[in-house]
Image (cartoon, grey):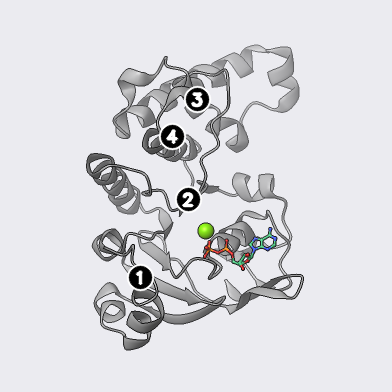
Amino acid sequence: MDGVSKSFGGNRALDGVSFRAEPGRVTALIGPNGSGKTTLLNMVCGFYRIDSGRVLLDDARLHGSASHRVARAGVARTFQTPGVPDGVTVLEAVAAGRYSADRASVPSAVLRLPRFRRVRRADTAEAERMLALVGMAELRDEPASSLPLGMRRLLEVARSLVASPGVLLLDEAASGLDEDEVERLAELIRRIRRAGGTVVLVEHNFRLVLDLADDIVVLAHGQVIAHGPPAEIETNPRVLGEYLGATEEVS
Ligand code: ADP
Ligand code: MG
């Protein structure tokens, strides 16, 4: 993205933000609460209109596109507050991630044409695979809404992965996870990276960031105050002052 700005009323949430997230790399986005991290993901996803600047995927522009188009272009995300639908099983909730990527058109879905049923079977198989990857295979028939927070987050990650996204945006996916779940998430992220995916990781757990990230972008007050590899960011005095000094939850 290039020079992206966004204001809410008089509040400048993003102020000329530029950075590039590369395929096959994990780009971590860190910064204190309110620094604009979630807003930035929302700009990429097409949830908010940008005031100025550009968001590009390869060379195609994403800004100005509706969110379903951005999803179809291969960008998936998870939310800071995982939304799990009522009345569906874990497996159905994960399989639902496929529909936005969409092979069966809406009319064929409504009419339940054979093509749709074929896609449904493929969806289910893929959803099962992703559930196994996040270590939740045995929970497939449980009601999704009964899951504790950590597992709801992992479910969201699994759901975003069934769409085989080229770009995955994770908004504090590790918060609320226990140590074992964090390790599963980390392994999944490494796997996506190995497969050549582009991962943008918004994360408060600084140790996890240092462990996983290839590049770190540090936001403060809607501006990029540092950008570089972990070894550089870890020792950057401005980052230590602005970010690490400002939060207690970095361990
Ligand atoms: P972070 O995710 O880094 O904690 P956010 O992107 O959520 O930060 O918020 C950045 C700033 O933008 C904050 O000042 C927040 O209050 C404001 N903001 C975010 N979303 C909205 C919105 N939908 N309406 C008004 N203000 C918003
Ligand atoms: Mg946020």
In this rendering, would 247 be left or right of 168?
A: left
Give whichever of discs 3 and 1 has the lower sequence position. 3
Q: Is residue 66 above or below residue 108?
A: below
Mark 2 neighbour density, 10 Å: few (under 14) some (14–19) many (20 or more): many
Mark carried by residue 101? none
Tell me residue 136's x, y (percent).
32, 27
Mark 3 neighbour density, 10 Å: few (under 14) some (14–19) many (20 or more): some
Give whichever of discs 2 and 1 has the lower sequence position. 2
Disc 3 + disc 1, Cβ < 8 Å: no
Marks 3, 2: nearer the viewer: 3
Q: Which residue is mark 2?
A: 166
Q: Is residue 188 above or below residue 152?
A: below
Q: Which residue is mark 1?
A: 215
Q: Secondary structure at mark 3?
A: helix
Q: Which residue is mark 3?
A: 145
Q: Secondary structure at mark 2?
A: loop
Q: Which residue is mark 4?
A: 152
